[in-house]
Image (tube, rainbow, N blue to C red):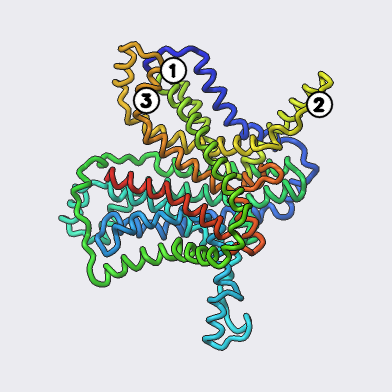
Amino acid sequence: MILGLPKRWSVSAFTLAGLLFTPFIALVIQALMPDQAVFGHLMETVLPTYIQNSLLLILLVSIGALLLATPAAWLVARCDFPGRSVFQWALLLPLAMPAYIVAYVYTDMLDYAGPVQKALRELFGWQSPADYWFPEVRSLGGAAVMLALVLFPYIYLLARTAFMEQSASLIHAARVMGCSPWRSFWRLNLPMARPALAVGVALVAMETAADFATVSYFAVPTLTTAVYDTWLGHGSLSAAAKLSVIILLVVFALIGMERFSRRKQQLYQKNSFHSGLERYALAGVKSLAASGYCALLLLLAFLLPFGILLDYALDYFEYSWTPEFFEYSANSLLLSALVSVLCMAIALILLFIQRISPDDRDALPARLASFGYALPGTVLAIGVLAPLTLADFGVNDLYALFDQRGPGLIFTGTLFALVFAFCIRFSAIAIGSLESSYKRISPSMDMAAVTMGEKPLGLLSRVHLPLLKKGLFAGMLLVFIEAMKELPAALLLRPVGYENLATYVFQYVSDEQLEYGALAAIVIVLVGLVPLIYLNRSLEQEN
């Protein structure tokens, strides 16, 4: 924009983005390879069921999360009732809870041998399952409920912000025209919040399409479990790649639908004295209903599962407090820290070159690097494994040319594959966080620095970095937490003998023994609370 960059800077940016985009290319190439009729067999037998279950799950979770989040967001943003100041941040807490942990807790509680059904049998004198009906927890519907409870904060956060930023003048006009709070919500607040709701639903849908652990635990066959089973069960990487391409098409269709739904929507009232708008003061039954709804949502989505986890951890503490626990905790912390630093470095390089380059084409690398977040973990693992396997063979063949013993699987057999996959998946988070901070730096500051003789590196170190500290910290924090929680890629790409907290906990969940891994699960949840608290404080300062 203000400096003439050497061509090598632009080439470096495109090279870096190309490396992060490699899995997409590798997936397509791998999907075109022969698969010994495995994919044909899947098409004739179970593939329609996989696709049907995946689409139905996405639909149910999206609708459920929307119905849970929208009333809570409007109540917190536009109404005054007891506990509102607590609920406005507490309703974000479920994001810190992995869905498969919530699934285990509720299954343990609601299964036939669980305390709920046992109490019902004792209360009504029922003797067997034939005497009564109880909803099946281990089902597609049960998985949808668990995912909706964990993912609704995506919609809640965006909707709450949208409701808070709506123009006070329009709300006052609705009141003058005699609209009740309920009519104002349906005819004004909700239509104006549609763009935010569409983005939130798209995020929830993509997270649902990428989920592996919850549907695997509930034995619900979806495309993500099909990729895992086809790869490891049938031994066909090509068939798994074909299934991965189908998942990618679903994800990109969701992104396209979200953008298409709001292509003509524009808001012109955002800066119109929204801070001066008084909230509706609820009293009596309405006040109790608002507090009760938010409290029940928080209880079911976070407090109850976390309380049961805490009880497990205390009862089985001596079995959990082991050298393995400390080893796996250290593995998670070191891996997440390394990935967060690398992702922020990638984001800083790409966005800095984009900002100071006079060529609009230099904005493309940052966009390409952001595509990785659309890759579910199981899909990403295949996209990473294919090129890294070729690289391993290439290196060892090169050693063989000189009659030397090759180093072995230096890419796919070490942590390199896992770090590379995490950087591809989470660079989008780093870029998004840093990009918002870069937009707050006036171009005039760059021009002033250049006028005073600053070179590009001096501009970055003496002007940009001091002003980007908050965005860098926020981005590193978000990437760190996501890396701590990422499960499918870790399961498929970890070196032999390597465990982190996510894989450690999931093994206990799969064996129906979460009690022994509850302490590790609590660590994951508590670490996940940090960015949520930081995010809420930032939003409160802005509003």
Disc 2 + disc 3, Cβ < 8 Å? no
**Could you say which disc has been placed on residue 251 in the image?**
none
Residue at the spot 36% in from the left edge and 21% down from the top edge: 462
Mark 1 or 3, closer to the camera: 3
Q: Quadrant of the N terminus?
A: top left
Q: In the image, is residue 387 above or below residue 58?
A: above
From the viewer's perspective, is 104 left or right of 178?
right
Q: Position of residue 117 (x, y in %)?
A: 56, 78
Q: SS of the residue at dot 1?
A: loop
**Could you say which disc has been placed on residue 464 in the image?**
3
Q: Position of residue 2 (x, y in %)?
A: 37, 16
Provide the residue designation for mark 1: 359
Q: Quadrant of residue 136?
A: bottom right
From the viewer's perspective, is 161 left or right of 363?
left
Of labels 1 and 2, earlier in sequence is 1
Residue at the spot 72% in from the left edge and 46% down from the top edge: 231
In the image, what residue type sits under mark 1? Asp
Of labels 1 and 3, earlier in sequence is 1
Disc 1 + disc 3, Cβ < 8 Å? no
